[in-house]
Image (cartoon, helix red, strand yellow):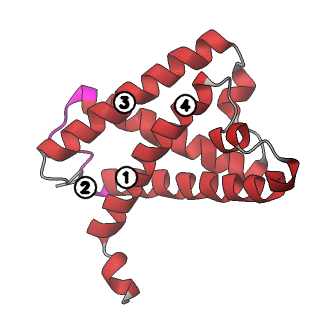
Amino acid sequence: MNIQEHTTPEKLEKYSFLWSEARLVVTSIALFMGGVSPLLFFLRMPIFYGLIGSLLTFSWIISGISAGYLLYRWDRGGRKLFGKKKQQDTISFFVMVVTGLNLGLAGLFGINIGIFISSNRIVFALTGILYLVTAFYLYKRWNESGKRIFK
């Protein structure tokens, strides 16, 4: 396997986008469950906590890197998404990027700013709905544009 095939800007864009989409869905599930990772919820055996904690930290850092890369590509691509400057696209994109950067910081520093601001279950549920709407909207736009974010 040639790693260079997977590190082209187009592939990195695709992988970062799909990772961020999956993160939005998984994070919405966590928020619906009260801010608890689905992994920790379903694997309640203490023997797994160290491994799960390390996997979560690693995945959060990857989320931050992915979001940062998407933000960089957006800036370098003329700040257009899906070939246009559409306000709804930009707002949805920034929901995805800001939440990814937040998780990246949580992975690095151990503090999730969003959870620190509010741990109210109603806020969690509303935020979870926002994440799902964002994920589905961006996925739809991505497919409509030929699976390219930055044209």
Check contact, mark 1 vs mark 2: CB within 8 A.
Answer: no
- Image quarter where the N terminus lies is bottom left
Amino acid found under the numbered disc labelled 2: Gly
Q: Which residue is mark 4?
A: 29
Check contact, mark 3 vs mark 2: CB within 8 A.
Answer: no
Check contact, mark 1 vs mark 3: CB within 8 A.
Answer: no
N-term mark: 1 or 2: 1
Q: Secondary structure at mark 3?
A: helix
Which mark, by number, is residue 18? 1
| Quadrant in the picture for residue 52 | bottom right
N-term mark: 3 or 2: 2
Which mark, by number, is residue 1? none
Number of numbered callouts drawn: 4
Which SS does the magenta portion mostly show? loop
Counting from the top left corner in percent of width and height, residue 41 is at 71, 36
N-term mark: 3 or 4: 4
Counting from the top left corner in percent of width and height, residue 95 is at 44, 33
Seen in the image, is 136 located left or right of residue 115? left
- Neighbours of disc 1 within 10 Å: few (<14), some (14-19), many (20+): some
Q: Nearer the viewer, residue 77 or 37?
A: 37
Q: How many angstroms separate mark 3 from mark 4 (CA)?
A: 14 Å
Which mark, by number, is residue 77? 2
Q: Residue furthest right?
A: 46
| Quadrant in the picture for residue 14 | bottom left
Q: Secondary structure at mark 4?
A: helix
Amino acid found under the numbered disc labelled 1: Leu
Q: Secondary structure at mark 2?
A: loop
| Quadrant in the picture for residue 5 | bottom left
Magenta region: which residues? Answer: 76-88
